[in-house]
Amino acid sequence: MALQLRPNCEYCDKDLPPSATDARICSYECTFCTDCVETKLFNVCPNCGGGFAPRPIRPEHEWRPGACVTKQLPSDKRVHLKYAPEDVTAFVALVRNVVPEER
């Protein structure tokens, strides 16, 4: 099963195409841009409390049969946070000083 490669930052709605090097994901594939992860979320996923990693870039070229961005299409469904900004700020403040592997 391939990553969904969601098309946008859930916080600021910035476009994050499949080749975006500034896309970050948590273990549930929640997707945010680097700017939001670093300046608003402080490496805390507001949905699950986990940390973030760079989202892999799916190859454009089909190096192996069926394994490329045109054969396994990215998601076109835009996802937005279900929490209000003030709820996100409070949650992040609660857990940001706990290292991700201990959350």
Image: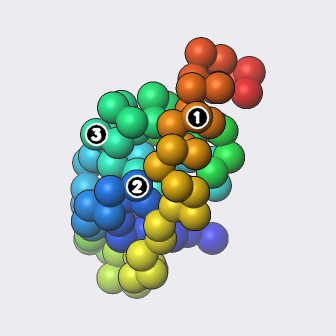
Residue 37, image x and y in percent? 40, 38
Q: Which residue is mark 3?
A: 35
Q: What is the CA distance from the residue labelled 2 to the residue labelled 3?
A: 10 Å
Sequence order check, earlier mark of 2 and 1: 2
- Residue lying at the far right of the rendered structure: 102
SS category of the residue bearing label 2 = loop
Contact between marks 2 and 3 (CB within 8 A): the answer is: no
Q: Of the residues shown, which amino acid type is indicated by label 2?
A: Tyr
Q: Which mark is residue 90?
A: 1
SS category of the residue bearing label 1 = helix
Residue 100, image x and y in percent? 63, 26
Q: Residue at x 51, y 44 (%)?
A: 86
Sequence order check, earlier mark of 1 and 3: 3
Residue 24, image x and y in percent? 41, 46
Q: Of the residues shown, which amino acid type is indicated by label 3?
A: Asp
Q: Of the residues shown, which amino acid type is indicated by label 1?
A: Ala
Q: How is the image coloured?
A: rainbow
Q: Which mark is residue 11?
A: 2
Q: Which mark is residue 82?
A: none
Q: Residue at x 45, y 29 (%)?
A: 42
